[in-house]
Structures are given as structure tokens and as C-alpha cells.
Image (tube, coloured by chain):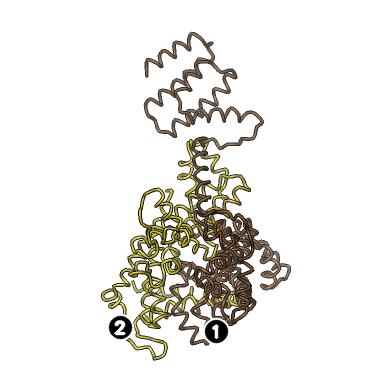
Amino acid sequence: MSQFLKDYVKVKKHNFRVGVKRARLSKACYLFLAPYAIIFTMFYILPVVVSIVFGFTYYNILEAPRFVGLQNYISLFLEDDIFLMAIKNTFMIAIITGPLGYLGSFLFAWLINELPRWVRSVAVVVFYAPSIAGNCYVIFSVFFRGDAYGYVNAFLMNTGIIDTPILWFIDPRYMLPVCMLVILWMSLGAGFLSFVAGLQGIDKSQYEAGYMDGVKNRWQELWFITLPNMKPMLMFGAVMSITQAFSVCEVTMTLCGYPSTDYAARTIVTHLFDYGFSRFEMGYACSIATILFLIMILCNKAIQSMLSRVGT
Amino acid sequence: MSDMNNNMTTENQNIIAEEQETVNTEAVETVKADAFNLEDEALSKLEAVEDVEEKAAEPVKSPSKEKASVKKTKKSKKKEEEEEVYHKPLIKRRKPNRSIAGDIFLYLFLLIVAVIMFFPIIYAVESALKPLDELFKFPPRIFAQNPTLDNFSDLFVTLGKSWVSFSRYMFNTVFITGVGTAGHLIVASMAAFVLAKYDFPGGKTFFKLVTVAMMFTGYVTGIPNYIIMSKLHMIDTYWAIIIPAFAFPMGLFLMKQFMEGLPTSLIEAAKIDGATEWTVFSKIVMPNVKPAWLTLIIFSVQSLWNNKASTVIYSEEMKTLPFAMQQIQAGGIARTGEAAAVLVVLMIVPIAIFIFSESQILETMASSGLKD
């Protein structure tokens, strides 16, 4: 046993020395990496650490941070009803729009893929445009206006489904569904592009081999040939859509107001903004950020392990 | 079923000459296999075998063969036709495993969804072109009857009268977008180059960190970022938006994945010819990854152009165009026309860039897969 340990330490030492030597030889690499690494660490890694640390303190920017232990988390989950509501809303939005948006991205990318070349280019622009159209979603507040002149209300009243106009963005019952609709409209983003590109890159001879081996219809082709080939893109798309689904805030804030009626459209990010930039309770806001961070990473890991089984 | 088979075999014996008989019994066997519910794959293999032998044995179709093929499903029938075509010098147009009904249904569905998806954007553009009286017309028309550009000129008049001139807002946004995108392109490409093409201690770990960083949004780091920036005295300067944009994780990720497709021999050849790392990077690698440039540019422009930056910039003369636009939109009913014009101005730039660079962007995204 002791011999084994000695050997183990020896090997480790050796590896370390080799590593140091290789690091010395590849100085140029570190120089190339340095600008990115510094900025990345500064604004992407450090903030996560800072938010975990400040999550345990009371900090309002003016005074020095004061350590309060788990107080922030305790009050988040036990006293802050609005936060619980925010979590509920965020999960509702994420569970409905995340998978739907993801499946939609793949479905449309897959259908577009068989179109002739120029139709395909147009179709990609048509489907991708909503997600890069800035705050074009504001136009939905015209469609869903609360009075009888709003188009949706007018349509529903003319067809006799409702007899009084619905206050879409003021009535807590309708806020979330309408927001989800808007978010779905915008959900064909980077993941969609990745799918379109990935589908074009699949080796055509695999399909021919598939016909020979008796792949009968497009669904079998999808499951046995396309999906296994697309696995890396599916992973990428999943990361994109989960990240988007949990970071919803601008749509709800713009359409339903900030704060919304009864906080019915409050999401975790809205809550974060409220405490961070309206009340300047940075410690509390940091604990919210930490929770959101954990949720996002865990969901991503879970979905990735699920996706690694696709098509096998 | 078995009766039918027997009938057919007797028919066959009556009609067809001896050498064709073997082939026919083959066909009958296939039908039997169908009856016994063999697996689909096995069946289609049998069919394929049969088809081949059929062609080898007899160029003329026998009537019994047709009867046998009635038994088969519609799709496999089409497959047969396709395979007969295969011998002629024709290019195959359709894939063999597609049904026409399915195609029509799916493309109709695609068309309807595309119209629904694009309708709000069309509507936004059209309402920017409508004069004020048409904007409030009820029932509404989608297309403007007397399209004008009045809303746009009104917008510029309103912005011109504001305390800080329109050109200053415009400059702020263009400056932030331009510098941020250029810096991002250079910084991220340099890092991507060494991460993709060299194996050095810590490189892989660093890249893993970057992929993890893609999994959470800027909102998570918003608050701590604000604290860090205030310590660095970067609040209320352009740099508060520009510098974090340099290290946008998705740009590095896409660039690195694309650069991995570049042949290593190219770099080695340049090295043998005496190029330094920097020369390799600037003269060999960068010109070869132009499609990836455009992808980085579109994602970076898209996030910077729409950046309101309301949390880090407080001076009015440094505020961005989207922020000024938002204030105009908040003007209520009287500014409806101008608000519509604002939407168009803000969305036209990213969409235009995307349209012009679509094929290159798709080329880059083809290597965007996340492997682990």
C-alpha cells in the first residue's frame, strides 16, 4: 500500500513537472489567451463568486457589507411571498416556453431543411427575425389592448366568445399566458440557427445507406439518422433555450408593467432588478442571483444528461 | 390469405413460362412474410432483394407480379417505381421515403406558421408607414392606404428638439456597438485560436468554464457586475458596457468550434516558413475564418445595439438610442406614430446584418455543436 502511495505521488509529481515545463514552452498561448481571460474572469467568473459571497451579507453600497449568515436565504424562502410567486412564475414560463420553443426550433429547422435553397434562406430569415427584432414584441400590446378596440378583444367579441373586453395585461389571470405567447414567438434564436446549419451538414450518404437498410418514412429517418447526427447541436440549442427560458424579464416588464398587478407577472429576474437597482439591497439581490445561477446550471446539467440518450 | 396465395400460384403456373416461375414464388414468399408479420426492416430487405432479382430475371412485367404488388403498401410501391427509375439516366428528384400527402401537409403547416411568425413584424413596419388617422382606424387595415414617412420625420424632429441631440444618442449607440464588436472580435478570436489549435495546460479547463458561462445569463451577474464596476470607477462611462462585451462567452465558443475545422497542417506549414504565432494568427488563421467573424458580429451587434444600459449609465448625454426611443414611446397616445417608427429603426439594423450575412453565419453555426 505504502509502495503504491509512493508511486502515485511520484507519478503526480512527474506530471506536474511536465505540466510546468509545457506551460513554460507555451508562453505565447497564454499571451494570446490573456486579454480574454482577464476580462472573462473579471466580468463573468468573479461576479459569480462575488454574488455567492455577498449573498451572506447585508450590503447597500453605502455602508460596508455586514455578515448576516443565511438570513437572506431564510427570508427569501420563508418571509418573501413575492419571491415565491416569482419562482412559481419563472418555472411556469420556463417549463412551458422552454421545451415548446426548443421543439419548435428543431421542428421548423427540420422542415425548412428540405426546401429549395433560396426558399430556405427566406424561411430562415422569417423564423429568426422575431428573436433579433429588438423590442418589436411591444407590438403585441397593440394586438392585446385592453379596450374593445384591441384587435384580439374585438375579434373575440365579434365572434361572441366574450361580451366584455379582457384586460389582457392588467388582469392577473391572463398576464402569464399572453406573455408566454410572446416569448414563444421570440424563441427561435441561436439554437434554431444551429439546428438549421447542423441539418445541412449531415452526410448525405448516411441517408442513402438508410434507404438501403429499409428506413421507410421521414419519422424513422429522423429518429435513426438525423437525431444521432444532430446531438451536439441539440446540446447547444438546449443550453440556449434553458438560459433564455429562465431569464425572462424584459417581456413581462414591458408588457405587464413594473411592478405588475398583484405581482402576477413577476419573475426571478424582475425580483433581482427590484432589489438590486430600485432598493439597492445588494446582499439580498446577490442571494437571489445565486439561486438563479444554481437553478440554471442544474437544469442545464440535467437536460444534457437527458439529451445524451437521444437516438440510441 | 393462404387460399389467395394458392390461387395465385396456380395462375402463375398457367400463365408464365418456367424460368419466370422461380421469381414469382419469391414474390409470393414475400407476401407470406407479410402475413406472418415479420419486422418492417426484414420485409423491406426482402423486397429489395426481390426487386433486384426481378430486374435481372425479366425485363417485362408479368400480370401476376402486379397482383402481388397490390398486397404491398403504397409506400413500398413507390419505392419500386423509384428503383426502376434508378436504371434510367434520370436524376432522382424525390427522396424515396417521403409521401406526397405528408409533404403537402407539412409545408402547408410551415407556411401558416411562417405567416403568423412574420405578421407582427410586417404589422410593425406597416404601422410605421401609416399616417396618424389610419393608425387609429377601426376595423384596422394591415396595409397602409396612403403610406408616408411622416412618422420617421416626426421622430427626428422630436429627437432634434430634445435636450441632448439625436446625433449624440446615435453616436453613443454606434460607438458602443462598434468598439464593443471590434474588440470582442479581436479578443475572442485570439483566445479561440490558441484554445482550438494548441494543447497547453489549463486550456481545456478554461474552455469548459466558458461553456459553463454560456449556461447563465447576464442578469445573474448584473448585480455583482455593478458592484465590481463601481469599485473600478467604470459606472457612467461607455466602458461599463463595452468591456464586458469583449468577453461575451458565446463568441469565443463559436469561434473556437469553427477554428477547429481549420487544417492544422496550414499552421504547421506557416511555422516551418518561419512565421511567429502572431503572423500565423493575423495572416493565416483570421482570413480563413471570415464566416465566423460575421457570426460574432451579428451576435455582438444584436446584444449591444438593443442595450438600454439603463443600470450603468446615468448621464443623459451618454445614454443610448434605445433608451431615448423608450422615452419617446412612453409619450403615450400622441406619440403612437413615432413609437412605431422607433420600433422599425431599432429592428432594421440587426435584421439587415443578418440578411446580408446569412450564409456565412449558417456555415459557422454548423460547427456550433456542444460535445461532452
Chain where mark 1 sits? B
* Quadrant, the N terminus of chain B: top left
Q: Residue furthest top?
A: B14
> Which residue is identified by label 2?
A69
> Which residue is identified by label 1?
B315
* Image spot of residue A216 (x, y percent): 48, 36
Shown colour of chain A: yellow
| Residue A289 higher or lower than B363, as above or below | below
Kind of residue at badge 2: Gly
Kind of residue at badge 1: Ser
Chain where mark 2 sits? A
Q: Residue furthest left?
A: A78
Shown colour of chain B: brown
* Image spot of residue B348 (x, y percent): 60, 63
* Image spot of residue A153 (x, y percent): 41, 56
Residue A307 in sight in this render: no
| Residue A126 higher or lower than B333, as above or below | above
Same chain under badges 1 and 2? The reply is no
Residue B103 got which mark? Answer: none
Q: Residue furthest right?
A: B273
